[in-house]
C-alpha cells in the first residue's frame, strides 16, 4: 500500500503555525480556486443555515419518506433524549436523533446539504451543532469546523471516493463520521493532531461497512447509520481529546479504506443485491413498494 | 492535486433523498436543457444501472424532469416536477436498461424542442451530486460542470481554434482548460472550453461569427 502523507502535512503545518486546520484548508482553497476568503466563508455559512434548519425540522413529528418506510423515528429519539433517561446521556442521544432527523428531511424530499452525500447528510450537522452547544462555541467556530471537515473529505474523495456505489457505506457514513469527529475536536478547542486522531479513530470503526440499502433506497439502514455515525464521531472526538491516539495514522486509514473499497464486491455497493437488501424482509418490502418487479 | 473544491465535499444544498440519484440526476437533466437552449416539448430518457432499478423510490424521474425544466438542486418544486412538466407541455418518457452502462448511475436523454430540433445528452452521476456529461450529440466529452463550459462545434480547418480563443481573450475571459475532439480527420470538431468567467450571450454571438463555427452551446452552470 503506497501512502502519501497528505493529511499529516496539513496537520504539521497547522501545528507549526499554531493555527487550526480550518485556517490551512481555507488558505489552500483561496489559493487553488482564486476565490476570496469572504466569499468562501459566506458560501459555507449559507450551507450551515440550510443544515441547521434541517436539524430543527428533522426532529419534528409528522414526517414521512417517499416510500413511507421512514417516519417519526427522529422525533421519538429526541423526546426520549430529553426525558433524561437515555443510557448514552442526553448529548449523544440528542445528536443521534438530530442526525436521523436530517436524514428524514432528505428522504421526504426536503432540503439538506450533501455532506459528503445525501445518504450521510445528518452526521455532520448533528455533531457540529451538538459539539458547539456542549462547548459554548459560536457560529464562526462551526463554520471553521465545516472547512476542516471538508478538507478531510476532499482527501478521502481524492484517494478513495465518497460514493457508496464505488466504495460502500464506509465512503458515505464512514467519511461523514470521520469528518465530523475531526471538526468536533476543532470546535471543542482540541489540537490539529487530536483532530486527525479523532478522524482516524472514527473512520477505523466504520471501515468495511457495505452499502446494502433495502429496495435500493436511501432509507433502511441509512437513516439509523446516520445516528450511529454521529455517536461514533462524538466518541472518537472525546477519545482523542482524552489524549488517546490512533496507532494507525489517518492517511493510512484512508489507504486501508481504499483497499477495502477495491475488494468490495459490486453486490454490496449500492446495488441492493446482497446483505440487508437481500434478506427476506427486505425483499418483501421491495415487492410491497415496487409491485412484482 | 485534482483541484477539487471543498464545496464538492460539503454541498450542494439539495432536495433529497440521494445526492447521486436525485441531485446528480437533476444536473444531467439541466445540462440537457442547456444544450437544447429552447423550450423542450419532448424527452425520451433512458435510465441505466442503478438509476433504472431504483428511480421511483429516489425521485430520480422527478429530479430529471426538474432539471429539464431548468430548476436547481435545491428547488422546493422538485417533488412535484412531473406535474409541472405536464403543465408546461413537456412530455417525458422514461425507459429502463438495468445493465449495460459504463457507470452504474447513467441517464441518456433525447430532447426535442418547440422548434422540432433535437439534442442528445448522456451523463453519469458519480457521487456527492457530482456528474460527468459523457456525450453531447455525436461527440464523446468529459464535462464536470465545475467551470462555465463552452462547446464549439466547428469545421476542421487550420486557425479556427486561434480565432475562437482570441475572441475569448479579447473579452477578458480566461480559459481554465480546453479539449478538442473530432470524429475523424476532416470531419466536424468539438472544442470543449472551460472558462473562469461565464460566457455571455454577446460573446457567444461574436464567436459564432467565425465562418467555420457550426454551433455553440453555453453551459454556464448546471
Image (cartoon, coloured by chain):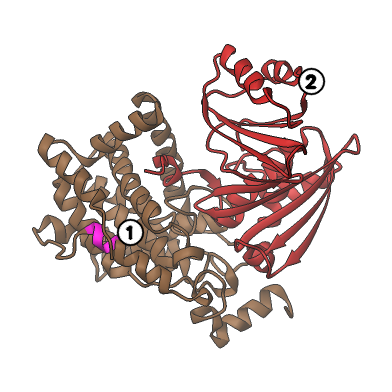
Give the residues drawn in magenta, as a range: A250-254
Q: Residue at x 27, y 67 (%)?
A: A204
Q: Is residue B109 above or below residue A16?
A: below
For numbered disc 2, what is the local secondary structure?
loop
Residue A213 is situated, as x and y percent measured from the top left of the image, at 52, 72
Disc 2 packing (10 Å; few <14; some 14–19; many ≥20): few
Disc 1 packing (10 Å; few <14; some 14–19; many ≥20): many
Q: Residue furthest left?
A: A243
For numbered disc 1, what is the local secondary structure?
helix
Kindly indicate which chain is depicted in brown in the rendered structure: A
Quarter of the rendering containing residue A78: bottom left
Residue B184 is situated, as x and y percent measured from the top left of the image, at 73, 44
Q: Give the residue pinned by disc 2.
A: B211
Marks counted in the figure total 2
Q: Report if residue B190 is visible in the image.
A: yes
Residue B129 is situated, as x and y percent measured from the top left of the image, at 53, 49
Kindly indicate which chain is depicted in red in the rendered structure: B
Q: Is residue A278 above or below residue B36?
A: below
Q: Quadrant of the C terminus of chain A?
A: bottom right
Foreground: disc 1 or disc 2: 2
Q: Residue at x 22, y 43 (%)?
A: A10
Q: Quadrant of the N terminus of chain A?
A: bottom left
Q: Nearer the viewer, residue A28 or A104?
A: A28
Residue B193 is situated, as x and y percent measured from the top left of the image, at 60, 31
Amino acid at each position: 500500500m503506497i501512502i502519501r502523507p497528505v493529511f499529516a502535512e496539513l496537520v504539521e503545518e497547522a501545528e507549526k503555525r499554531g493555527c487550526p486546520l480550518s485556517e490551512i484548508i481555507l488558505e489552500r482553497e483561496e489559493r487553488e480556486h482564486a476565490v476570496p476568503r469572504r466569499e468562501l466563508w459566506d458560501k459555507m455559512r449559507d450551507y450551515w443555515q440550510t443544515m441547521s434548519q434541517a436539524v430543527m425540522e428533522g426532529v419534528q413529528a409528522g414526517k414521512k419518506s417517499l416510500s413511507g418506510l421512514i417516519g417519526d423515528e427522529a422525533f421519538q429519539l429526541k423526546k426520549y433524549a430529553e426525558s433524561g433517561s437515555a443510557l448514552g446521556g442526553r448529548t449523544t442521544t440528542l445528536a443521534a436523533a438530530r442526525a436521523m432527523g436530517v436524514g428524514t428531511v432528505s428522504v421526504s424530499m426536503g432540503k439538506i446539504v450533501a455532506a459528503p452525500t445525501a445518504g450521510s447528510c445528518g452526521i455532520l450537522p448533528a455533531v457540529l451543532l451538538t459539539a458547539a452547544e456542549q462547548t459554548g462555541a459560536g457560529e464562526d467556530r462551526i463554520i471553521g469546523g465545516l472547512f476542516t471537515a471538508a478538507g478531510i473529505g476532499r482527501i478521502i474523495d481524492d484517494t478513495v471516493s465518497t460514493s457508496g456505489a464505488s466504495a460502500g457505506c464506509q465512503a458515505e457514513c464512514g467519511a461523514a463520521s470521520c469528518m465530523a469527529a475531526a471538526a468536533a475536536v476543532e470546535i471543542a478547542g482540541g489540537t490539529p493532531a487530536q483532530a486527525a486522531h479523532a478522524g482516524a479513530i472514527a473512520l477505523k470503526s466504520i471501515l468495511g461497512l457495505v452499502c446494502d440499502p433495502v429496495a435500493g433506497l436511501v432509507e433502511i439502514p441509512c437513516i439509523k447509520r446516520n445516528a450511529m455515525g454521529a455517536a461514533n464521531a462524538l466518541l472518537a472526538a472525546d477519545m482523542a481529546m482524552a489524549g488517546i491516539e490512533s496507532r494507525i495514522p489517518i492517511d493510512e486509514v484512508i489507504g486501508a479504506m481504499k483497499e477495502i473499497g477495491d475488494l468490495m464486491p459490486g453486490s454490496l455497493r449500492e446495488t441492493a443485491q446482497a446483505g440487508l437488501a437481500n434478506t427476506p424482509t427486505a425483499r418483501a418490502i421491495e415487492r410491497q413498494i415496487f409491485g412484482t418487479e | 492535486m485534482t483541484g477539487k473544491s471543498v464545496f464538492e465535499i460539503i454541498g450542494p444544498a439539495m432536495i433529497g433523498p440521494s445526492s447521486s440519484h436525485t441531485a446528480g440526476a437533476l444536473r444531467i437533466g439541466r445540462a440537457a436543457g442547456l444544450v437544447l437552449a429552447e423550450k423542450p416539448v419532448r424527452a425520451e430518457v433512458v435510465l441505466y444501472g442503478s438509476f433504472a432499478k431504483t428511480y421511483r423510490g429516489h425521485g430520480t424521474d422527478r429530479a430529471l424532469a426538474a432539471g429539464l425544466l431548468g430548476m436547481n438542486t435545491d428547488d422546493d418544486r422538485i417533488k412535484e416536477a412531473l406535474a409541472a412538466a405536464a403543465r408546461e407541455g413537456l412530455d417525458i418518457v422514461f425507459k429502463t436498461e438495468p445493465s449495460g452502462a459504463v457507470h452504474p448511475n447513467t441517464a441518456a436523454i433525447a430532447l426535442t424542442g418547440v422548434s422540432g430540433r433535437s439534442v442528445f445528452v448522456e451523463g453519469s452521476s458519480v457521487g456527492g451530486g457530482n456528474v460527468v456529461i459523457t456525450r453531447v450529440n455525436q461527440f464523446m466529452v468529459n464535462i464536470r460542470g465545475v467551470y462555465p463550459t463552452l462547446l464549439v462545434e466547428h469545421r476542421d480547418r487550420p486557425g479556427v481554434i486561434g480565432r475562437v480563443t482570441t475572441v475569448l481573450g479579447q473579452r477578458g475571459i480566461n480559459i481554465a482548460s480546453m479539449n478538442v475532439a473530432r470524429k475523424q480527420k476532416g470531419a466536424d470538431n468539438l472544442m470543449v472550453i472551460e472558462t473562469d468567467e461565464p460566457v455571455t450571450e454577446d460573446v457567444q454571438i461574436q464567436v459564432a461569427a467565425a465562418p467555420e463555427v457550426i454551433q455553440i452551446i453555453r453551459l454556464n452552470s448546471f
